Amino acid sequence: MTSGISRAGARLTALMPTRADLADMRRDPRRDLLAGLTVAVVALPLALGFGVSSGLGAEAGLATAVVAGALAALFGGSNLQVSGPTGAMTVVLVPIVGEYGPTGVLTVGLMAGVMLVVLAALRAGKYMQYVPAPVVEGFTLGIACVIGLQQVPNALGVPKAEGDRVLVVTWRAVVEFARDPNWTAVGFAVAVAAVMLVGARWRPTVPFSILAVIAATAVSQVAGLDAAQPIGDLPSGLPAPSLGFLDLGSLSTLLAPAVAVAALAALESLLSASVADGMTVGQRHDPDRELFGQGLANVAAPLFGGVPATGAIARTAVNVRTGAGSRLAALTHAAILALIVFAAAPLVSRIPLAALAGVLLATAVRMVEVGSLRAMAKATRSDALILVLTAVATLALDLVYAVIIGLVVAGALALRAVAKQARFDQVPLDRGDHSAEEHALLAEHIVAYRIDGPLFFAAAHRFLLELTEVADVRVVILRMSRVSTMDATGALVLKDAVEKLKRRGILVLASGIRTDQRQVLDSVGALELLRHDGREYATTPEAIRAARDHLETTGVLTAVPAQKPQTSSEEAVR
């Protein structure tokens, strides 16, 4: 009991901030402060836009960026990760808001945060490395499409239609716009998106998103454009933390959405942290600490009215590119956004929704890495299929189902490819020191097969079919030294084949069974069958001598003195 508590305490301690984190923040604070300011400028319109898109309002997006951004920066596993509301999470939240309302979303966020903390304690972060690249690329492409489609109502200046399917909502918005066009909103959205996309190519370090939003807001106010609907009133500060939204009776109902949110938060945060690692030299995130930090962030954000948060790839990339070297940059980003909440809420409330839609449309376009997609599509047919299937599932279903489908298909195709590597070939019988005449006689009654590669459930039945259709011989020798892996299905199929051949009066001898495969063979009774009914030998020459003795005993082969065969290599033996 005491040792268990000690282990739990040590595991919790390993998830906490360290002195090295503080030392990193002291190394070059000026550079980190400048990076944090730049990220805050980029993050402000995104936080507002994703808050509006989620259905909880711009204030929820700001609260998430401040609270979750600070806690994830402090407790997370990456020195460079920037967290907050994201487009991927918004995609999941929209149907939850439609079905359970704002209080349901806050409860889901709290539950998801607890789940992430549990995943961190269970050290589940390492499993992110098993997500194939085509799944990640397809997932990102699907998210980009969904984010873009979500902005269509605000970009067209029409009320958002009821429904949780983005394709349906988008179509209804287009129909409504056709009835009563709002070209002012379209102009703002297109102009902001164009400025961001063109500006990013011209001067990548300039925060054109905030400049475009400021310009759109100024034009709207000066020209008195009523058609450009603003965000609306924002509170001048964060609300006091409260659990008033929590309804214990609804926890069981909200469990499934909470699992989906937790899965997405883990996936996107660890993916974003991995991207940050790849953009730097010497930076490596701790996946379990990252889950822990995101868990604490998502536990705290709902208390202040915030939506669930994840690591944000776009903001993290800006953080890295502007020279951030420690957590101080992400903490600075959260502090500046908090200052904006308290000091500039009236100004922020005048930003046109169409301008924010333009920001998110440009963000969606920039999420799509055409070069990566082209390379993945050209790699193999399997990679192309997984990418397209994941992207379509993201668009048509939801993100978690899309990832699950992508992983299942990728796993099935990988198993198929591995199974094709398994080979079952007839090989010439080693002559040894037998005379040509005797060797020909032995080869007439003995056949040797070599098994190469894995003998497992995906390939085992093909092996059974081929082996049991062997021609009319007296002895079959199975050379097994090249079997790379074996599972219970493979062992059972091997046992079944030996029994089938035995019923036909054919003796089966095995050679070269590896030590690591004896346990699985023994567990299903195949090893005992080979030892007694079939016989098992360490080397192939021993098996050939036993086969020769068997033929002599049964009178098939006239007794001829056998000499010990000479072998020149391990391949000849096994």
Image: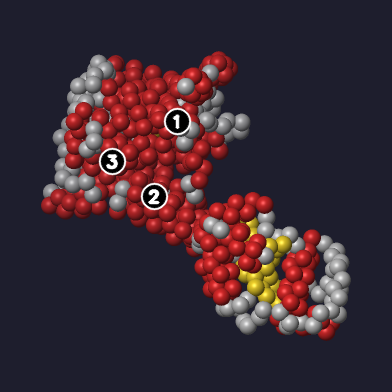
- Residue 559 lies, in percent from the top left, at 81, 79
SS class, disc 2? helix
Q: Earlier in the sequence, mark 2 or mark 3?
A: 3
Q: Is residue 425 visible?
A: no
Residue at image mark 2:
404
Q: Is residue 211 left or right of residue 171?
A: right
Residue displayed at 86% across by 76% down: 561
**Which residue is situated farthest in the left direction here?**
179
Compared with 429, 227 (above or below) is above
Indicate the quadrant containing the C terminus: top left, top right, bottom left or bottom right.
bottom right
- Residue 96 lies, in percent from the top left, at 23, 39
Q: Is residue 254 visible?
A: yes
- Residue 229 lies, in percent from the top left, at 18, 35
CA gap, disc 3 to disc 1? 20 Å
Residue displayed at 78% across by 70% down: 545
Disc 2 to disc 3: CB gap under 8 Å: no
Q: Is residue 43 left or right of residue 323?
A: left
Tell me how the rendering is colored.
Answer: secondary structure
- Residue 370 lies, in percent from the top left, at 46, 52
Q: Which mark is residue 256?
A: 3
Q: Which mark is residue 120?
A: 1
Give the residue type at disc 3: Ala
Q: Earlier in the sequence, mark 2 or mark 1?
A: 1
Disc 2 to disc 1: CB gap under 8 Å: no
